[in-house]
Amino acid sequence: IGAMFIVLPSFWVVALGWTGMKLGSLLNGLEEGTKTAQTAGGKGAAEIMHHVKK
């Protein structure tokens, strides 16, 4: 019965930590993958604003 109070909660904490690390890695990958699109969009918007202000 001692395993229910020590081992199972420990397993739960480890599982949640592992899941959090995997999700963090996934979100970081998405952020890095969209960085070039964000840069291109910013350059395009700046170019349009430059032509509109003329």
Image (spheres, grey):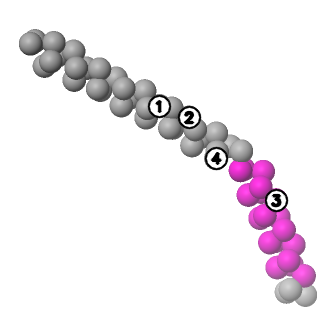
Report the residue marked by disc 1. Answer: 21
Q: Earlier in the sequence, mark 4 or mark 3?
A: 4
Q: Which residue is the extreme one toward the top?
A: 2
Residue that sits furthest to the front in the current view:
1
Residue matched to label 3 = 40
Closest to the observer, 16 or 45? 16
Dot 4: few (<14), some (14–19), or many (≥20) neighbours within 10 Å? Answer: few
Q: From the viewer's perspective, is 21 left or right of 40?
A: left
Horizontal side, residue 19 vs residue 6: left or right:
right
Residue 31's disc is 4
Vertical side of 7 occupied by 17: above or below: below
Q: Secondary structure at mark 1?
A: helix
- Which labelled disc corresponds to residue 11? none
Magenta span contains residue 42: yes
Pointer 3 with pointer 1, Cβ within 8 A:
no
> For mark 3, does the 10 Å Cα neighbourhood hold few (<14), some (14 to 19), or many (20 or more) residues?
few
**Residue, x 83% and y 64% (percent of image)?**
43
- Numbered marks: total: 4
Q: Amino acid at mark 3?
A: Ala
**For the residues marked 4 and 3, what is the alpha-carbon distance in whole angstroms?**
15 Å
Magenta part, dominant SS: helix
Determine the CA span between mark 1 and mark 2.
6 Å
Mark 2 neighbour class, 10 Å CA radius: few under 14, some 14 to 19, many 20 or more: few
Task: State the SS at label 2.
Answer: helix
| Quarter assignment of residue 28 | top right
Name the element at disc 4: helix
Task: Please report the bounds of the magenta region as a residue range.
Answer: 34-51
Horizontal and vertical percent position of residue 21? 47, 31
Label 3 or label 2, whichever lies nearer to me, is 2
Inspect the image, locate mark 2, and give the three-letter code of the amino acid beneath it. Ser
- What residue did someone put label 2 on? 25
> Is the C terminus in the top left, top right, bottom left or bottom right quadrant?
bottom right
